[in-house]
Each structure stands twice: as structure tokens, then as C-alpha cells.
Amino acid sequence: MNMNTDHSLTLTRVLKAPRAHIWRCWTEPDLLVQWFCPKPWFVSDVQMELRVGGTQTMFMNGPAGERMPTGGVYLQVTPGERLIFTDAFVKAWEPSARPYMVGDIALSDTPEGHTHYVARALHWNAEDKASHEARGFHQGWGVAADQLEALAQSL
């Protein structure tokens, strides 16, 4: 996958937790629900079929009772290192009504035993990128990364 696109947003951090713990938080539904959205938002009803072509579904829930279904298909699953997924498909290569992005999560070790964390959102067009950025990509994904780090440290 070409990561050099004008339609991507990237969050890069060093998370002070072992890579294996960060991976678990991304791939175990019981852990994902604890950190994935900036509070007071939260996810629920998470189901994961962690394999290439496997589906992921969940609901994003807001403080005023909002409940939005979200999901997609895994494109790459390299245990402990890389997770790439997209909402362009709803299941096993069945196209979604409106693709929005590809998520790319890359993990690697730092010399201190922490995790170099790179989270990218790759969009199909400039308008979707601009919309995602305007709705708070950097702040929202940053807060979620803080929550991810705290949870991973507690494992």
C-alpha cells in the first residue's frame, strides 16, 4: 500500500507501554471498548474477525444517545506489527455504500522497550481528508492514543 498520499492524516507517538500490550488493545474487543473513542464517547458491540478479509463491526456511542454503526474489513494483519483496515467493504469484499478511509496502524519497538506508534487515516479524496481534519482528527486520535497508552500500561 502506498503511504505517500496527499489525502492522509497521521498521528505519530511513542507510547510508554510494550508493543504486545498495544497490539492487544487494538485486537481484543474487551480492551478496545475501554480506549477507542475520546470520552464521553465510547464504542460497544465490538466484533472482530482478525484476518485478511475478516470483518470488524462496532457502534460509536455519544453522550446524547447518538449510536452510529461502523465497521469494515481487514486488509492486512501482521500480528504485533501492522493492522490495516477499511470501511470500503462491509464484509468479504462486498462494497460499502460510501468508502471513507483506510486505517493503518504500525507498531515497532523503541530501544527503551516502548512502542513507536503510527496511526494513519488515508482518505479517497481531499474533501474527506479536510472533513476528518476539521472534525478533530488530531485531537480525537491523540486523546484516544493517550487512553490506549494508559490502558496498555495497566495490563
Image (spheres, rainbow, N blue to C red):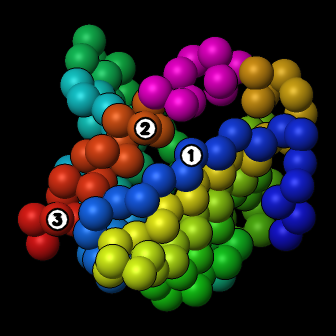
Report which quarter residue 26 is drawn in.
bottom left
Q: Is residue 134 magenta?
A: yes
Q: Which is nearer the N-term, disc 2 or disc 1?
A: 1
Is residue 50 among what the camera can see?
no
Q: Residue at x 71, y 53 (%)?
A: 102
Which amino acid type is shown beneath numbered disc 2?
Answer: Gly
Marks 2 and 1 in Cβ contact (< 8 Å): yes
Query: Which residue position holds label 1?
Result: 11
Query: Which residue position holds label 3?
Result: 153
Whether residue 108 sits left or right of residue 145 in the image: it is right
Q: Which is nearer the N-term, disc 2 or disc 3?
A: 2
Which amino acid type is shown beneath numbered disc 3?
Answer: Gln
Q: Residue at x 47, y 53 (%)?
A: 13
Disc 2 versus disc 3: distance between alpha carbons? 17 Å
The image shows residue 65, relative to residue 70, as above or below, that is above
**SS for dot 3:** helix
Which amino acid type is shown beneath numbered disc 1?
Answer: Leu
Is residue 127 among what the camera can see?
yes
Nearer-the-camera pick, 16 or 142: 16
Find residue 142 and name its label. Answer: 2
Disc 2 versus disc 1: distance between alpha carbons? 7 Å
